Amino acid sequence: MIRYVIGRVGGGIAVLSLVAVAVFCLFESLDSDAATVILSRVGGADPTPEQVAALRAELGLDRPAPVRFAEWAKGFAHGDFGDSLISGRPVREVLLSRSGNSAVLAVITAALLIPLALGLGLIAGARAGSRADRAISVGALTAESVPPFVSGVLLVAVLSLTLRVLPAVSLVPTGTAVTARPEILVMPVICLLTGLAPHPIRMVRAQTAEVMASPYIRTARANGIGRRRLILRHAAPNAVSVSIHPLAGSVVGLLGGIAVVETLFVYPGLSQEVLAAISARDFPFVQSAAVLMAAFGIGIYLLADLLALLAGPRAGHLIVAGRR
């Protein structure tokens, strides 16, 4: 167990290193940098080569690429994410100021996603072939086939423009917490659930239906054991153990889903800052944000692996065997 965890953590560090190198190389391949962007925005015209060279020297962009990457990596390893090339503010400060809003959206979505996926999957799988099963399965397939931005536009059209029960955008006054206006969270959360819940629902449904059709379940029924007890004692534990990794994938999928939802609903989260930083060629900010998001995904999958190991010897054996 300990050796497995150490191996997974080592693999995660290797993946983070590759992510950092890949983001840095992509930035280096761009045809402009932060100096060019800043001068273009200030002057309104194409800057001269002398102006670009002077600002690049001021920002430290004239140094060799390996030196700049090594400096950022050393600081990141010590918790120093550097300063934004555009605003001059510490990257850590900007990340903390915006990531809180994104975290609220992610936590609420995850708190609803897990019981929703397990509950609907158990209901559908426990009565395979029934009307409830068909309704849940068709609904899940339909929702999974609709891109998040399309479902978001439909939500705005129906709930905001037609029924006028919710605001079309999730604007928050400066200095106000998003929890002070809970109505702005409703449509973003629904949009995220619509895109992320279908896959784990179908996985739980398939496993539950398989367990309910197994010989020992039929024997238990013949001995007079009630359906509720069969579901809670036998089907549910199996469904939960198998659904750990699909649920983990959905939680990690919040990273991409939140980026779309925050842009669509103008939600004041981290995604807007990341997109603005990419446009401004703000390397320290984008580099640090990308590595932190990758670390979040790796951490969730590691936690899922550990939960699967604890869920049962057979599941743990399969995971360890699959990692070799």
Image: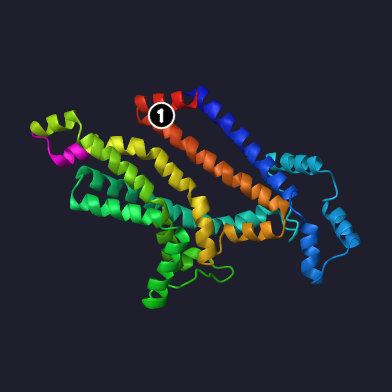
Vertical position of residue 305 compared to residue 122: above or below? above
| Residue depicted at x 23% and y 49% | 133
- Side (left or right) of 124 relative to 299: left
**Colour logic:** rainbow
Answer yes or no: is residue 164 visible.
Answer: no
Q: Main secondary structure of the magenta part?
A: helix
| Residue 300 percent across, percent down from the top left | 49, 41
Residue 32 lies, in percent from the top left, at: 77, 56
Give the residue drawn at x 50%, y 25%.
Answer: 4
Q: Is residue 276 left or right of residue 142?
A: right
Q: Residue, x 63% and y 59% (percent of image)? A: 275
- The amino acid type of the residue labelled 1 equals Leu
Q: Is residue 225 magenta?
A: yes
Measured as percent of width and height from the top left, residue 313 is found at: 36, 24
Residue 203 falls inside the magenta stretch: no
Callout 1 secondary element? helix
Q: Quadrant of residue 281?
A: bottom right
Q: Is residue 9 visible?
A: yes
Span highlighted in magenta in the image:
224-231
Q: Which residue is mark 1?
A: 309
Q: Residue at x 74, y 44 (%)?
A: 72
